[in-house]
């Protein structure tokens, strides 16, 4: 028996990534990010979102991709996990899609060199590949560092 789940799709360097919608609190246009001294290289800084201070992870840096090109399409996706809110900075955020979990190929054998294995799987939708990000692994690693 397969289950169907919704994913928020975003772009990093023209590649499509998906995160389960149940982790997404809000999607915000880029606002001022305040740098934090001695933060890990992939922490862009913090934002003040409606009175709450939220750290922002630059996913391009975290995934060791080319630096993000800030534009009108740049977004901060605020995620909630274990009662902690964290923002992720992405090139753009385009849509919500529904994917059958049986159609998501496990990436463990495909991506063995990817640091800390933040990829849950890969799916296709209308000839487009969507890389599914493992949010618990990503956020636990950011919280613990």
Image (tube, rainbow, N blue to C red):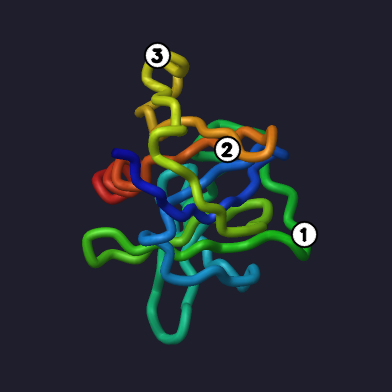
Q: Position of residue 73 (x, y in %)?
A: 73, 61
Decide which of 109, 91 is in the foreground and name it: 109
Residue lying farthest to the front in this orientation: 1
Badge 1: how crowded within 10 Å, few (<14), some, or many (20+)? Answer: few
Q: Is residue 115 left or right of residue 128?
A: left
Q: Is residue 102 left or right of residue 17?
A: left
Instruction: Indicate the secondary structure of the residue bearing disc 3.
Output: loop
Whether pointer 1 and pointer 3 mark residues with C-beta atoms closer than 8 Å, the reply is no
Tell me the residue at 73%/56% (across/down).
70
Query: Does label 2 or label 3 sit earlier along the sequence?
Result: 3
Query: Does label 1 or label 3 sit earlier along the sequence?
Result: 1
The residue tagged 3 is: 109
Tell me the residue at 47%/78% (across/down).
48
Tell me the residue at 64%/71% (across/down).
29
Residue lying farthest to the bottom in this orientation: 51
Instruction: Indicate the secondary structure of the residue bearing disc 1.
Output: loop
Instruction: Estimate the spatial distance between the alpha carbons at disc 2 and disc 1, rounded to whole Å.
Output: 22 Å
- 43 versus 54 height, above or below: above
Query: Does label 2 or label 1 sit earlier along the sequence?
Result: 1
- 30 versus 121 height, above or below: below
Whether pointer 2 and pointer 3 mark residues with C-beta atoms closer than 8 Å, the reply is no
Q: Position of residue 21 (x, y in %)?
A: 43, 59
Quarter occupied by residue 28:
bottom right
Determine which of the numbered discs, if any, sits on residue 71 in the image.
1
Quarter that holds the C terminus: top left
Instruction: Estimate the spatial distance between the alpha carbons at disc 2 and disc 3, rounded to whole Å.
Output: 17 Å
**Mark whose residue sits in front, 2 or 1:** 2
Q: Position of residue 13 (x, y in %)?
A: 69, 39
The residue tagged 2 is: 130
Decide which of 30, 26 is in the foreground and name it: 26
């Amino acid at each position: 028996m397969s289950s169907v789940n919704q994913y928020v799709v975003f772009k990093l360097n023209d590649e499509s990534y998906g995160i389960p919608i149940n982790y997404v609190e809000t999607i915000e246009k880029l606002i001022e990010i305040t740098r934090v001294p001695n933060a890990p290289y992939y922490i862009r800084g913090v934002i003040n979102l409606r009175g709450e201070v939220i750290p922002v992870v630059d996913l391009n840096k975290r995934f060791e991709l080319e630096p993000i090109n800030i534009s009108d399409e740049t977004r901060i996706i605020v995620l909630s996990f274990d009662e902690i809110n964290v923002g992720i900075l992405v090139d753009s955020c385009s849509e919500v899609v529904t994917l059958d979990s049986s159609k998501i190929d496990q990436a463990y054998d495909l991506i063995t060199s990817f640091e800390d294995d933040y990829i849950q799987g890969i799916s296709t939708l209308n000839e487009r590949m969507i890389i599914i990000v493992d949010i618990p692994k990503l956020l636990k690693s950011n919280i613990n560092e």
